[in-house]
Every structure is written in C-alpha cells, then in structure tokens.
C-alpha cells in the first residue's frame, strides 16, 4: 500500500482527499461511514494500492511522480517512483483499454498519477482507520 500525508476535506457535504494537485471525492459508502463517525476535516494518511494508481495522459488533478526504477513484468509494468516526497510503487498494464502499447518508463521520467475516491483508504495520523 502506498501511504501519503494528505488532507481530508469536506465541501458541500462531500468528503474528499487531496494531496499535491490531486483531489478525489470519496465513494458513497466512504461518505456514509465518515459522516456516521462525525469525522471532521483533518490531516490524514492516505493509502492507495499500487494497482489502483492511474496514469493520466496530462497534468491536471494529478500527482506528479518521478520514476526511479521500471520493471517489465510481462502483462504489467511495475515502477518505483517518488511522489509527494514518498517512495511509491505503481503497477500498470502494458496495454491501455484501446489496445495501445504503453512504453517502458525510464529513470527521471515524470508521470502524472491519479486515483479514484472508491480506492482510497483513509487513516488518522495515529493510524486509526477513519472509514469504520
């Protein structure tokens, strides 16, 4: 699990998480659980699994990451990068949904990462799971 120092916000009655230039509105289930627990906006630890990170084609609501190591693993590419001052692992398929081959990543390449609100795991700074 990739862990980031992030911010839980509440705007217009909706919870969202933000880190750097990336913001994701949380899923309805997570909304209900956080509201039921009367969770306030706060600094959090955000967890996102490596296979739940998405490569965006361009910057904008994304988290920039600098590639350190790239490994071709058959149908997937695993890359290790630095994003928001953290070492992260990202796993992406070697082909996109349109059947286009995704090139290998090289050390120093900058990538734009994002994630959806339904794959976020929200923890308090003390490690407590805030979603339950």
Image (cartoon, rainbow, N blue to C red):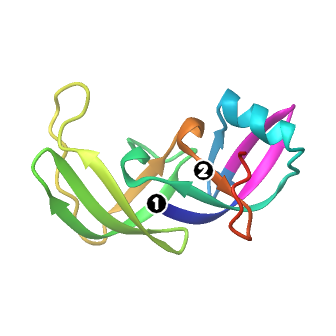
Question: Whole-percent x and y of residue 95?
Answer: 18, 37
Question: Whole-percent x and y of residue 1?
Answer: 46, 60
The residue beneath circle 2 is 121
Residues in magenta, as a range: 7-17
Q: Quadrant of residue 24?
A: top right
What mark, if any, has residue 124 been given in the picture?
none
Alpha-carbon neighbours of circle 1 within 10 Å: few (<14), some, or many (≥20)? some
Question: Whole-percent x and y of residue 79?
Answer: 28, 62
Quick one: which residue is furthest to the front in this view? 132
In the rendered view, tell whether residue 116 sits above or below residue 72: above
Q: Secondary structure at mark 2?
A: strand
Q: Quadrant of residue 118?
A: top right
Q: As rendered, which of 63 and 26 lies closer to the eye?
A: 26
Q: Are marks 2 and 1 in contact (CB under 8 Å)?
A: yes
Determine if the magenta segment contains residue 130: no
In the rendered view, tell whether residue 72 sits above or below residue 39: below
What mark, if any, has residue 1 been given in the picture?
1
Q: In the image, 113: left or right of 9?
A: left
Q: CA–CA distance between discs 2 and 1? A: 9 Å
Q: As rendered, which of 19 and 51 lies closer to the eye?
A: 51
Picture residue at 72% right of the left edge, 42% below the top:
16
């Amino acid at each position: 699990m990739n862990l980031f120092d992030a911010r839980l916000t509440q705007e217009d009655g909706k919870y969202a998480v933000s880190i750097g230039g990336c913001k994701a509105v949380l899923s309805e289930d997570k909304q209900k659980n956080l509201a039921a627990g009367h969770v306030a906006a706060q600094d959090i630890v955000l967890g996102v699994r490596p296979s739940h990170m998405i490569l965006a084609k361009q910057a904008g609501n994304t988290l920039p990451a600098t590639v350190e190591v790239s490994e071709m693993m058959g149908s997937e590419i695993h890359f290790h990068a630095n994003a928001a001052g953290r070492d992260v692992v990202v796993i992406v398929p070697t082909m996109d949904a349109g059947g286009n081959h995704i090139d290998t990543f090289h050390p120093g390449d900058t990538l734009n990462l994002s994630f959806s609100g339904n794959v976020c795991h929200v923890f308090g700074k003390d490690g407590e799971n805030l979603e339950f």
